[in-house]
Amino acid sequence: MRLRSLSILLLLCSSLWAQQYATILYRQAELPHAVPVSEIDSVVIKDVAEVDATYFAAQKDTVYVVQTKESHWKGKKVAFFGDSITQNGEYVNSFVSLTGCVADNQGISATHLAARNSGDSNAFEKRYTKISTTNKMVIVFGGTNDFGHTDTVEFGQFTDGPKTGKYTFYAGLHRLFKGLYDRFMKRGVPVVVMLPIHHGTEIDVPEFIINADKSFTEGTNPTTGKTFREYVNAIREVASYYSLIVLDAYSYSGLSPMTEIGSSNRKFFKDGLHLNDAGGLKLARWMYPQLEAVYEMFYDF
């Protein structure tokens, strides 16, 4: 009743505010920041008590409107290209909920970025051509299995380049990222390489070995002798060579399974590597503002 009375009152008194009028709308939603606008036909508020703070306190030539933020990616098709962490869907589903995008989930469990041989058809470098060019963004999220599995290729070196038939981690990265650049970036579609989150200590080859005295030893892949940090740095190095967009989830996402070692009540991880729902939401929220900026780099808004 009070809400309806306020609406009528504001409509009757429109001439008192430089011929502006306001229709008060009731919206039960999260309250983002308020921004001043010079001319507007409606004021969106969270509840009736907010009228005093937002409208009546404003100068007569300014109305304050509460804006509800909408993602640039709403309704846009986005490819999530990954391994089991993507296939399981925790961060993908959370990102869809946050943005309203349409997910094209291209995750396949246990897959590697770099092909181990010519028959490794599920490797990222082999299957990127199956990603539809109708996607408006491609997010690449892998690498943990290249380190974690013992049946992996030799590490190689940056100068291996995209040479056909050369099976090293570096060569596979070159073929993958060059292929994605040619298929998408040349068409104006952003390719985002998200560095893998920490591999942890509990699944496959451990990233770290925790000693009895709580010191730790950095684990190495038995085939290549390389640490997970070296794998992560190689991904960053080759992605940067092709000027792809790199999001450093390894360093800055706030997700590290080492913080949950021995915990009976895991917060973000199911098993020391794979995300649970809370972990998926945390990663999606970390991605959100960065990928909004990516949209503004590539598309009109």
Image: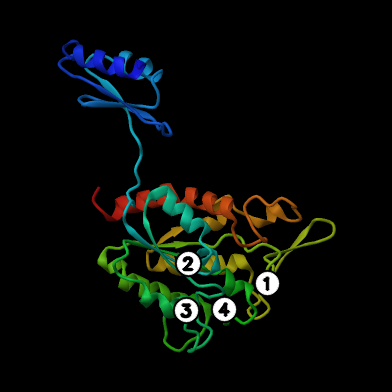
Q: Quadrant of residue 189?
A: bottom left
Placement of 70 over or under 112, stated as above or below: above
Q: In terms of sequence position, does the residue under pointer 1 or pointer 3 come before the other?
A: 3
Q: Which residue is mark 1?
A: 204
Q: In terms of sequence position, does the residue under pointer 2 or pointer 1 come before the other?
A: 1
Q: Quadrant of residue 242?
A: bottom left
Q: Which residue is mark 3?
A: 172
Q: Position of residue 184 (x, y in %)?
A: 31, 68
Q: In terms of sequence position, does the residue under pointer 1 or pointer 4 come before the other?
A: 4
Q: From the image, which quarter does the N terminus lie in?
A: top left
Residue visible at 26% across and 21% down in the picture: 63
Q: Which residue is mark 2?
A: 237
Q: Say what amino acid the circle numbered 2 marks.
A: Glu
In this rendering, does residue 36 appear at all?
Answer: no
Q: In this view, which residue lies farthest toward the front?
A: 1
What is the C-alpha distance between the residues marked 2 and 1?
Answer: 25 Å
